[in-house]
Image (tube, rainbow, N blue to C red):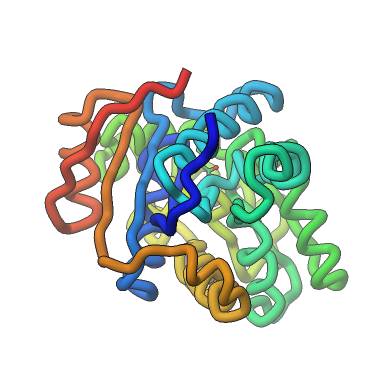
Amino acid sequence: MTLPQTPGPIGVFDSGYGGLTILRQIRALLPRYDYLYLGDNARAPYGPRSFPLVLEFTTQAVHRLFEMGCQLVILACNTASAKALRTIQQQCLPGWDPNRRVLGVIRPTAECVGELSATRHVGVFATEGTIASQTYNLEIAKLHPDIRVTGLACPMWVPLVENGEAEGDGADYFVRERIERIMALDPEIDTIILGCTHYPLLLNKIRLYAPSHVRIIPQGDYVASSLRDYLSRHGEMDLRLTKRASCRYFTTEAPERFDASASLFMASPVESERIDLS
Ligand code: DGL
C-alpha cells in the first residue's frame, strides 16, 4: 500500500499509557501541530518481551501511523527506542518512504544528564528490555564518558500504571524497594533518570521515597525541546506537518478503559478509537 504524500500529523507511539507523559509535554511546547497518539495497551507491557517481538509490534505501529498520514513518528517508549528504532530507521524507512522520520526518546534524555549530575553518578530506572539492551549506558558513555551509570529494571512499575494502581497503596512497596536498591548499588547517585515513559505516572511516590538530594528526571521536557530543535533545523519536515492543534487517540484495547485513564492524566476529556495492529 502506498503511503499518503500529503502533509499530516505527528505520530506518538507507546506500548500503552506511558507515552502520554511525552505527548503532554510536546503539546505544551508545540501546541499548533496535529497529533495522533497510539497506545498498544492490548499488548503492553513491552518491557519483558523479546527483542524480535518488540521490533515486530513497533514496526506494525509505526507503519500504521504512516498509513494514517503521519509524516514523523516519535517512539515515546524507551523499550521500543532501545530495541526497534535503529532497525526501523535503517531498514524500513528507505523502502516505505525515505522522507518520513522516526525519532526516539533515549538520545535526548542521555544528552541532558551532563548538566544535571554533580557527582557524575547517575541512576537509570527502566524496563527489563531497556536495561538489558544497555542503550542508556552506551549513549551516556558516548556523550559524557566521565559519568558512571547504574541501571535497574523495575518490572512491577508498568503493570501498576497500566492497571490504574499508580496512586494506590500497593505501589508504595514496589517504589520504595527499587529506590533503596539503586541507592545501595551506588550511594553516590545524585540524579535518577526515569527511562520509561510510564514511570512519571508514579512520580509522587518516587519523590516521596527518593533521598531529598537525589534529582529525579522525567523525560518529557527534554524530548519536547529536542523535537522543537529538530523541527527548527529541518524546515522540510516542518512543511510536511499540519497545524490545526488537533489530537486524536487510538488504542488496541477497549477505548472506554483507555479514555478513563487518559482523561485523568491529560486533564481533559479523551475520546479514543480502537485500532487493530496485528
Ligand atoms: N513506556 C515504555 C517505555 O518507555 C514501555 C513500558 C512497557 O510496555 O513495558 O519503556
Name which residue lies at 69% across and 49% down.
Answer: 151
Q: Position of residue 76 (x, y in %)?
A: 50, 50
Name which residue lies at 63% across and 66% down.
Answer: 108
Above or below, 121 relative to 68: below
User: Can the viewer see residue 140 in this picture?
Assistant: yes
Horizontal side, residue 15 vs residue 79: left or right: left
Name which residue lies at 47% across and 44% down.
Answer: 4
Horizontal side, residue 101 vs residue 3: left or right: right
Above or below, 103 relative to 190: above
Q: For residue 214, what is the image quadrant? A: bottom right
Above or below, 247 relative to 132: below
Q: Position of residue 185 (x, y in %)?
A: 71, 50
Nearer the observer, 102 or 125: 102
Q: Furthest-top residue in view? A: 278
Horizontal side, residue 175 vs residue 51: left or right: left
Q: Position of residue 48 (x, y in %)?
A: 59, 26
Nearer the observer, 171 or 44: 44
Name which residue lies at 64% across and 73% down.
Answer: 112
Mark count? 0
Above or below, 188 relative to 131: below
Q: Furthest-left residue in view? A: 269
Q: Position of residue 2 (x, y in %)?
A: 54, 35
Nearer the observer, 16 or 94: 94
User: Can the viewer see residue 133 in this picture?
Assistant: no
